[in-house]
Image (cartoon, rainbow, N blue to C red):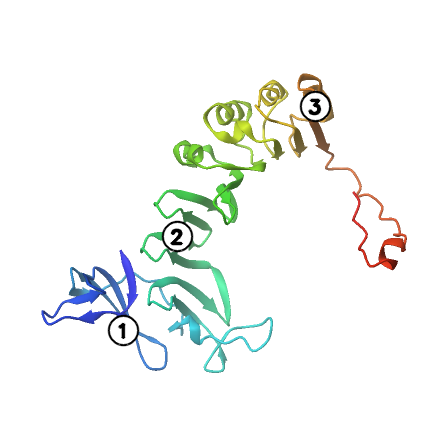
Amino acid sequence: MQRMRASFLIRGVDGRLRHGKALFSGLAYSLRHDGTLDSLMAASEGVITGPSPDWLPLPEGGLRVNSALLEMPEDYGPRLFQGRPFTGVAYAFTRNGYCTSEVEYAGGFATEVSERRWYVSGQPKMHVDGGEYTSWFPDGRIQRRGLKGELVYGLNTRDDGHLRELVLRDASFLDMEILSALTPTEEFQMLGGAVDTAMLHTLREQTDIGAVPRLRLVQTRVGAEGVEILAAFKNLREVWFDGNPGLGLQEARKLERLRPGCVAHHVDPDALPPVRRPRVLSSAANGHTARPRG
C-alpha cells in the first residue's frame, strides 16, 4: 500500500485520484500551509473511502508535521518546530511525494520507542513499538528482530547487499530460504547464543557461509565438537573465537592442526589491552603516517 502526499495526486475528469497514469490505491497525507498534517485519507482505485486511523498516536500536546520543517540550529541538540523543541510525530517525504517514515519526538529528540518506516513501494521497512523492533527486506521478509532492547535476530548487510553478519539469539526467527540466497562477505561474523554446534553444521551445509575464508564467532554456543565442523569449511583460512564458552585456546590450536594453513585466534576476554608504546618520528618526518600496530 503506497503512502503519498495528497498534493502529488491528480484528480482526473472522472473524479478519481491518479498517481501518474495509474489509479491511486493507498493513503494520502494532506498538509496545511504551515507544514502540519491536516488529514490522512484512504483511497482505493482512485476513490476516497474515508479517513484512515493508520498512524502513530500523538504524545500529549503533540503535533503532526513534515519533518523537513524541523530545524537543528546546532550540531547537536533538540530539533525545533517554529522555534520550539518539537513534540509530536514527524513525517518524512521524498521529493516525489512518497512518505517514508513517521517518528515520535519528545522535547526535540526522537523517543526511539515509536517509529515506522517504509520503502517507496509502501512495503514496511521498520517498526519500533516500545521494546520491540522489526525491520524487513523489500520483499517483506524479516531482516532484523529486537526484543526488550536486544537484537535477537539480524541479517546485517553491506550497501552492496552482501551479508556481513548473522545475529542469532532466537533461532525461531531464522529464515533459511532468504539466508541461503544471500552472498556472505569474505570476512563474516556470527553472533549469538542460538548459533550452536548443530546450527553451525546446518549453516555450513545449506548456505554459502561454509565457503567464507575468514570467520568470527562471537558469544556463540558452539562447543568443542564444532572444531571438526569448522575444519570442513571449504576455504577457511582464519578464524576468531571471541567470548564463546565452548571454544578456547585449546580448540583454536586443534583447529590449526586439523586444517593446516588456517590461523585460529582466541580472544581472551580477561586479557588486558596491549600497552601503547611511543611512536618513533621517522615516518612522520618524511610525510607518512605510522601504521598502527596491534
Is disc 2 surrounded by few (<14), some (14 to 19) or many (20+) residues within 10 Å?
A: many
- The quadrant of the image that shows the C terminus is top right
Viewer-proximal residue among 286 and 209: 286
Residue 182 in the figure: left or right of residue 39: right
Going from N to C along the chain, the mark reached first, 3 or 2, is 2
Q: Position of residue 82 (x, y in %)?
A: 45, 82
**Could you tell me which secondary element the residue under label 2 belongs to?**
strand
Residue type indicated by callout 2: Lys
Q: Is residue 263 above or below residue 98?
A: above
Viewer-proximal residue among 32 and 208: 208
Residue 76 in the figure: left or right of residue 275: left
The residue carrying mark 2 is 125
Residue type indicated by callout 3: Gly
Going from N to C along the chain, the mark reached first, 1 or 3, is 1
The residue carrying mark 3 is 261
Residue at horizontal 54%, vertical 28%? 211
**Could you tell me which secondary element the residue under label 1 belongs to?**
helix
Q: Position of residue 58 (x, y in %)?
A: 37, 67
Viewer-proximal residue among 118 and 65: 118
Residue 62 lies in what quarter of the image? bottom left
**Could you tell me which secondary element the residue under label 3 belongs to?**
loop
The residue carrying mark 1 is 7
Going from N to C along the chain, the mark reached first, 1 or 2, is 1
Q: Is residue 204 above or below residue 139?
A: above
Question: How far apart are labels 3 and 2 at the CA level?
Answer: 43 Å
Question: How far apart are labels 1 and 2 at the CA level?
Answer: 24 Å
Is disc 1 surrounded by few (<14), some (14 to 19) or many (20+) residues within 10 Å?
A: few
Residue at horizontal 50%, vertical 42%? 162
